[in-house]
Image (cartoon, rainbow, N blue to C red):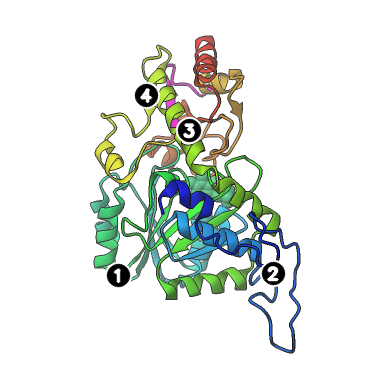
């Protein structure tokens, strides 16, 4: 089955044995009757499993070409579950330029439980080798990175992790399975904040993991049930509905993202544009080989270089909404240094390129002419 068919039908056979509904019913129930003592039919208690959630997990498996989907109440809850595979003393090598909430979870929560994190610039993945020792258990990658749009070579990273018997987890939120399938490239775990493109309509917070290995899946299902950060059935229904249009939305996100990146590149008020589709992007060739297009995320700096200029631009946008988050049908603009990445110390932030003049755009699927006109008027004010 090809991807565009999978998003609609993947894993969805016999979705409603009771009435053959085309969409899975929202099973708004906490518990399931046992026919006789101990004899339950597939489901017993809704934290452990729910049919609507099971339908969504099957869809996630299908679109990520994996064997086991495990969903969570948020993207961070999904990452939290991965880290609970570890023990005190274990070490993690993480990309340095990553989602601010992931950094906060690593540095403010799991560090206190005795897990050590190395934040490493991975534009050249060989850098990982310098941090591997006998305590290393997990390599954490986000590509494209947020918000600098750096590209990390998943195949090369997987070679390193396989050689040292480490887990490789990839946050695939920005690319989505429409553009990139990390399990096919050698990763052990692919993670999504389904809040973003999978849901796609800015109306649900959710996360998921997909893996191929059965024993790894069983550990993660155990954590899902034992820690309990499970999504409700309504939310599962919404994400499943979102996935059904992922391919058409992504196609337009990519087209509009390309047009916005190219427009900004020649704009007199813009200094630098970060978008992996430019041939001069430092890892453009890797992006080209591991992604099918370049997505809807674009970051740029103003030529004035000041925090005031960046904030003035985002406040003057009219079609783009000034808001946190990304991946919905509507275009959003944000200021990473004071919004999504404020929890990263200024010095570390600037080292990663997240300067005060940086603006991040989640380019939506509106008419591209309106988006370009909006950017132009907001930039010409500064
Ligand atoms: C939003 C996001 C997360 C966290 O997901 P939530 O659903 O907000 O918990 C993790 N990684 C990336 C890249 C994100 O954009």
First in sequence, mark 3 or 2: give its number: 2
Question: Residue 251: which disc?
Answer: none
First in sequence, mark 3 or 4: give its number: 3
* Residue drawn where x is 28% and y is 39% of the image: 288
From this viewpoint, is residue 305 visible? yes
* Residue drawn where x is 31% and y is 52% of the image: 154
Q: Is mark 4 within 8 Å of ligand 1?
A: no
Circle 4 sits in a helix, a strand or a loop, which is it? strand
Question: Residue 253: which disc?
Answer: 3
Determine the CA span between mark 3 and mark 2. Answer: 35 Å
Determine the CA span between mark 3 and mark 4. Answer: 21 Å
In the shown orientation, is residue 323 left or right of residue 64? right
> x, y percentage for residue 68?
47, 66
Q: Do the residues under discs 3 and 4 have CB atoms within 8 angstroms?
A: no
Q: Most extreme residue toward the bottom, as rendered?
A: 37
- As drawn, 92 above or below 274: below
In the shown orientation, is residue 192 left or right of residue 303? right
Question: Residue 46: which disc?
Answer: 2
First in sequence, mark 2 or 4: give its number: 2
Circle 1 sits in a helix, a strand or a loop, which is it? loop
Residue range of the region highlighted in magenta in the rendering:
297-307
Q: Which of the 4 quarters of the picture holds residue 269?
A: top left
Circle 3 sits in a helix, a strand or a loop, which is it? helix
> x, y percentage for residue 372?
49, 17
From this viewpoint, is residue 299 visible? no
Determine the CA span between mark 1 and mark 4. Answer: 39 Å
First in sequence, mark 1 or 2: give its number: 2
Determine the CA span between mark 1 and mark 2. Answer: 35 Å
Determine the CA span between mark 1 and mark 3. Answer: 37 Å
Q: Which residue is mark 4?
A: 272
């Amino acid at each position: 089955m090809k991807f565009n068919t999978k998003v609609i039908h993947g894993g969805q056979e016999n979705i409603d044995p009771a009435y053959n509904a085309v969409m899975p019913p929202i099973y708004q129930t906490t518990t399931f009757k046992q026919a006789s003592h101990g004899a339950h039919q597939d489901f017993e208690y809704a934290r452990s499993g729910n049919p609507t959630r099971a339908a969504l997990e099957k869809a996630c498996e299908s679109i990520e070409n994996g064997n086991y989907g495990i969903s969570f109440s948020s993207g961070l809850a999904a990452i939290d579950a991965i880290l609970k595979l570890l023990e005190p003393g274990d070490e993690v090598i993480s990309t340095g330029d990553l989602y601010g909430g992931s950094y906060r979870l690593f540095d403010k929560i799991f560090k206190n439980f005795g897990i050590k994190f190395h934040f490493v610039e991975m534009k050249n993945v060989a850098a990982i080798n310098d941090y591997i020792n006998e305590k290393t258990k997990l390599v954490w990658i986000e590509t494209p990175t947020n918000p600098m749009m750096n590209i990390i070579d998943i195949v090369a990273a997987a070679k390193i992790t396989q050689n040292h018997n480490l887990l490789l987890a990839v946050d695939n939120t920005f690319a989505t399975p429409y553009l990139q399938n990390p399990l096919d490239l050698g990763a052990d775990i692919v993670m999504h904040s389904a809040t973003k493109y999978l849901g796609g309509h800015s109306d649900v917070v959710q996360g998921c993991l997909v893996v191929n290995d059965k024993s790894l899946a069983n550990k993660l299902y155990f954590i899902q049930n034992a820690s309990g950060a499970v999504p409700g059935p309504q939310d599962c229904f919404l994400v499943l509905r979102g996935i059904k249009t992922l391919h058409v939305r992504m196609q337009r996100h990519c087209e509009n993202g390309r047009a916005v990146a190219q427009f900004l590149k020649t704009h007199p008020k813009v200094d630098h544009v970060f978008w992996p589709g430019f041939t001069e992007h430092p890892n453009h060739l890797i992006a080209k080989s591991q992604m099918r297009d370049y997505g809807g995320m674009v970051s740029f700096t103003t030529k004035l270089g000041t925090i005031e200029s960046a904030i003035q631009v985002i406040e003057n946008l009219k079609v783009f909404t000034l808001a946190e988050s990304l991946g919905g049908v509507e275009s959003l603009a944000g200021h990473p240094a004071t919004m999504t990445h404020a929890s990263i110390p200024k010095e570390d932030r600037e080292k990663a390129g997240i300067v005060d003049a940086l603006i991040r755009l989640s380019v939506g699927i509106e008419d591209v002419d309106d988006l370009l006109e909006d950017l132009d008027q907001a930039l010409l004010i500064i």
